[in-house]
Image: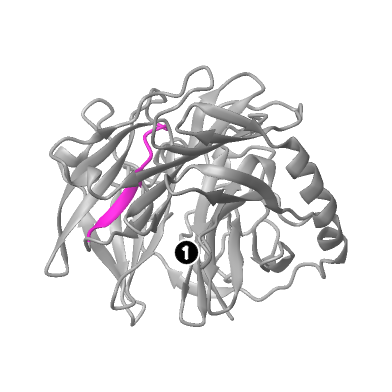
């Protein structure tokens, strides 16, 4: 997902920047132009949208804004529920009191229940809130969650939380990284947690976003890792790569995954594009090129790779769509539909996806208030649900 700081009609040319130790920037326009030419054939030959999504789970009351998905060792699924729609729903008179944020669990029988309810000490000491987004189980068996605070405070308050798991139960949460503006997507590659920062620095018609990599051993220290703010083209040593866009939406880098060859893939939602990065031994991007774009793919968000199917899958937040992408960047739309509340299984502003067996699980985040005139979705509904596509 996505949050929006500025809206403008201008579309600026975009420069992609690879960061070396958080300080060196390399112009990648030539690579992008070359990739644009190669991708044009894929755009022209796309067979167009299908209509295959089905209802998966009707969420209970209190799940007004679902987001991240993480799979556990026993094939259960952890669902983040930040409930960012509270303010909108309260103003519209659709709910009487705000719904608390929490983490839910979907068992192999597809029954859903609360898994971890955030405690008062888990809330940010300045904002009084927690905003759980994407999450992933780490090598230590604990769950690492992007805590997006940008809706409550834009001044580097977002964090990474570790939910400590003991004997299969979530028992407590610790802050392990702080200093993000908008921590968003997470992915474990080896012993490093890669995190998309959707806003490194924002201007009137420019936005810098990027990806950080933090080692597990750093997050096991007593004090949280503190990221230095990005300023004047220089970033923290944990910075892997940066992207530049025009800030018409206010969110850049969003979804993240790796393939089985070690390449990193990042969605840049306001560009409608996905980029591939080759990393060196220090987890710095040494080459970043445009990987995929398509006339049907408007706002790529959550991204996964299936080595078994040799295919990427991406949720399209702005276009009510889900796409499959081949290794050479060819985009095939699996589902795309108009404005809906998702009760019939159609997509209602999908933000995250996860592959469990042959089922592609899809989170309908439904945050239309955050994307005025940008998304197919135009209003927030009180029907909360997840969809699926059988592959």
Q: Does residue 270 appear anywhere in the picture? A: yes
User: Residue at point 54% right, 57% down?
Assistant: 263
- Across and down, in percent, residue 302 comes to 53, 56
Left or right for 37, reference 276: right
Hey, which quadrant is residue 46 in on the image?
Answer: bottom right
Q: Could you tell me residue 334's position as x and y percent?
A: 68, 70
191 vs 89, nearest the viewer:
191
> Judging from the image, what secondary structure is the residue with disc 1 in?
strand
Residue extending furthest front? Answer: 281
Residue that label 1 marks = 385
In the image, residue 246 lies in the stretch drawn in magenta:
no
Location of residue 39 (image quadrant) = bottom right
Q: Is residue 31 left or right of residue 241?
A: right
Left or right of 257 on screen, residue 310: right
Kindly identify the residue that appears in the image at 65 percent across and 27 percent down: 7
Task: Magenta stretch: give its range.
Answer: 142-151
- Of residues 338 and 189, the one drawn nearer to the viewer in this rendering: 189
The vertical placement of 2 against 140, above or below, is: above
Q: Is residue 77 above or below residue 209?
A: below
Q: How is the image coloured?
A: one colour
- Residue 309 lies, in percent from the top left, at 58, 78
User: Is 147 a magenta residue?
Assistant: yes
Q: Write down the quadrant of residue 205 in the picture.
A: top right
Tag count: 1
Visible residue check, residue 4 = no
Locate the C terminus and report the quarter of the image it occupies. Answer: bottom right
Residue 203 position within the rendered picture, expressed as x and y whole percent measured from the top left: 59, 19
Q: Specify few, some or many for label 1: CA neighbours under 10 Å numbering under 14, 14-19, or 20 or more.
A: many
Which residue does the image show at 41% across and 49% down from the upper left?
194
């Amino acid at each position: 997902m996505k949050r929006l700081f500025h809206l403008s009609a201008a579309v600026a040319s975009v420069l992609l920047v690879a960061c070396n130790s958080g300080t060196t920037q390399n112009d990648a326009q030539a690579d992008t132009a070359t990739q644009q030419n190669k991708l044009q054939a894929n755009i022209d030959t796309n067979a167009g949208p299908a209509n295959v999504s089905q209802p998966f789970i009707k969420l209970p009351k209190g799940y007004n804004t679902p987001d991240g998905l993480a799979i556990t060792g026993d094939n259960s699924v952890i669902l983040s529920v930040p409930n960012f729609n509270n303010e909108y729903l309260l103003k519209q008179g659709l709910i009487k009191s705000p719904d608390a944020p929490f983490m839910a669990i979907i068992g192999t029988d597809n029954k859903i229940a609360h898994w971890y309810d955030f405690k008062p000490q888990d809330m940010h000491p300045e904002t009084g809130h927690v905003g759980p987004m994407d999450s992933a189980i780490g090598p230590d068996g604990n769950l690492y969650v992007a805590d997006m605070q940008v809706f409550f405070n834009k001044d580097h308050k977002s964090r990474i939380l570790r939910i400590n798991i003991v004997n299969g139960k979530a028992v407590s949460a610790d802050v392990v990284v702080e200093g993000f503006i908008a921590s968003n997507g997470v992915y474990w590659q080896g012993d490093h947690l890669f995190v998309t920062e959707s806003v490194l620095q924002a201007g009137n018609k420019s936005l810098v976003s990027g990806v950080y990599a933090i080692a597990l051993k750093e997050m096991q220290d007593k004090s949280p890792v503190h990221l230095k703010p990005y300023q004047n083209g220089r970033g923290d040593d944990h910075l892997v790569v940066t992207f530049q866009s025009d800030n018409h939406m206010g969110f850049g880098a969003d979804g993240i995954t790796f393939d089985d060859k070690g390449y990193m893939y990042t969605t840049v939602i306001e560009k409608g594009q996905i980029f591939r990065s080759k990393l060196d031994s220090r987890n710095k991007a040494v080459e970043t090129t445009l990987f995929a774009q398509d006339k049907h793919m408007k706002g790529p968000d959550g991204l996964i790779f299936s080595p078994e199917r040799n295919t990427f899958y991406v949720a399209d937040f702005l276009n009510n769509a889900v796409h499959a992408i081949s290794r050479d960047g060819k985009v095939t739309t699996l589902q795309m539909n108009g404005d809906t509340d998702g009760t019939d299984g159609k997509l209602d502003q999908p933000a995250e996806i996860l592959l469990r067996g042959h089922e592609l699980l899809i989170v309908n985040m439904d945050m239309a208030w955050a994307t005025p005139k940008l998304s197919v979705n135009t209003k927030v509904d009180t029907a909360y649900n997840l969809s699926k596509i059988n592959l």
